[in-house]
Amino acid sequence: MARTNSRDRELRARAEAVIPGGMYGHQSTALLPDDYPQFFERGEGAHIWDVDGRRYLDMMCAYGPNLFGYANPQIDAAFVRQLGLGDTLTGPTALMVELAETMVAMVSHADWAMFCKNGTDATTMALTCARAHTRRKTVVRAKGAYHGAAPWCVPRPTGTLESDRANQILCDYNDVASLEAAVAQAGDDLACIFAAPFKHDAFIDQAEPNLAYAKRARELCDQTGALLIIDDVRAGLRLARDCSWSKIGVEPDLSTWGKCLANGHGLSALLGNDKARKAAASIFVTGSFWFQAAPMAAALETMNLVKTTDYLERITALGQRLRDGLAERASAAGFSLRQTGPVTMPLFLFDDDPDLRKGFCFSSEMLDRGVYVHPWHNMFLCAAMSDADIEDALNAAEGAFGALKKQSATLQPVPKLAFLTTGGTR
Ligand SMILES: *Cc1c(COP(=O)(O)O)cnc(C)c1O
């Protein structure tokens, strides 16, 4: 099916001239099918429109920030109201205290909160706080887990130094023996253990946290005096109205939040318990925009919706419906589709598709049918999605599986994904 994407093409050409590489970071289209739009015009509820006027049901939710719908009237009204009063001022407004009180009341392990802009600010602050608290250097974290794009954790290290990543030991997520070995290697220098709430690495099946691993991480921190940090930047509020590991009964000392905290407005947070309070007060962390009032007004409204609506139950039910429906349609078309991760943050990978050529083809076919899915990154459900939207996605999938079936035998490898099977880097 031919799609008009002339405006997108034109913008890409102009971007090539004035933006290095045309685009950067996770917004670089390099690892999406070629027909995916780069530029969008607007979003409303669960849908986005690209610059060529095509509308998509957006299963990416801005890579997480959209929890209650794009342009949510209630949240954005609070944001705009505060903009009129003042946003970036010489100091914070009362909203900062109110938001800290709200989050501390909602997240069981938390006794205090500090606010910043990006998830990377929060994870980097967590690391600094743990090192200040313990006066030790070493961090243990899981191989392949994303914690942001600062030199200490960026997945593609071009331009950073080995020394930026010094004093880190990597272990395998959910592998108790590997965690124990990493902690043993840290000896008396362990400052913290970082953990993702579930394994949400790119390109591979997602995995629930296993209880033995979570409990052992807590015990090892208690035994050594190190701090346990949950990086809830991505999963926060999509698994629980609390820190995500509250579901398995393991409380961290610190947790990091971002993405949907203010439903798309720029705000992230570090939450901590009393044990870490003194260290948190002792570190110098700040930013010109960290005290902005309008995103805090949006966050308070977001928290209000978190507390007073059944959004979590609804997105869970929608996610389950999507998962069941997709499984049915995949198997009817003769495909073995692995759907992993929590139903509110799904990832789809095809069996026998090591270089993702099937995944790329399926995603393109979904896009063609008005559903924006991602071939190798976990997706997100939002509370603005309806049963009808899921039905649309399933109908699109039925068509996409059919189209994939026709092309299956003749699909060519995707050159830009060669690194997946050759062991090279992207
Ligand atoms: C996105 C993400 C971050 C970084 O957040 P930014 O706002 O992009 O800096 C950190 N940790 C996890 C788990 C994330 O998904």
Image (cartoon, rainbow, N blue to C red):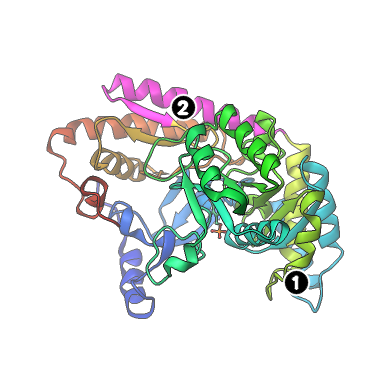
Instruction: Report the front residue among 17 and 402.
Output: 17
The residue at the point 33 percent across, 25 percent down is 330
- The relative height of residue 346 versus residue 86 in the rendered view (above or below) is above
Q: Position of residue 5 (x, y in %)?
A: 32, 60
The residue at the point 67 percent across, 56 percent down is 130
Specify whether residue 314 is painted magenta. Answer: yes
| Label 1, residues with CA under 10 Å away: few <14, some 14-19, many ≥20 | many
Disc number at residue 219? none
Q: Quadrant of the C terminus?
A: bottom left
Specify whether residue 75 is painted magenta. Answer: no
Label 2 amino acid? Arg
Q: Secondary structure at mark 1?
A: loop
- Measured in 3D between alpha carbons, the distance from the residue under mark 2 to the one under mark 1, in whole angstroms, is 41 Å
Disc number at residue 87? 1
Q: Is residue 169 left or right of residue 203?
A: right
| Label 2, residues with CA under 10 Å away: few <14, some 14-19, many ≥20 | many
Q: Position of residue 122 (x, y in %)?
A: 64, 59
User: Can the viewer see residue 139?
Assistant: yes
Residue furthest out toward the left: 410
Q: Which residues are magenta?
A: 310-339
Which residue is denoted by mark 2 in the rendering?
Answer: 323
Q: Quadrant of ligand 1?
A: bottom right
Instruction: Report the front residue among 68 and 180.
Output: 180
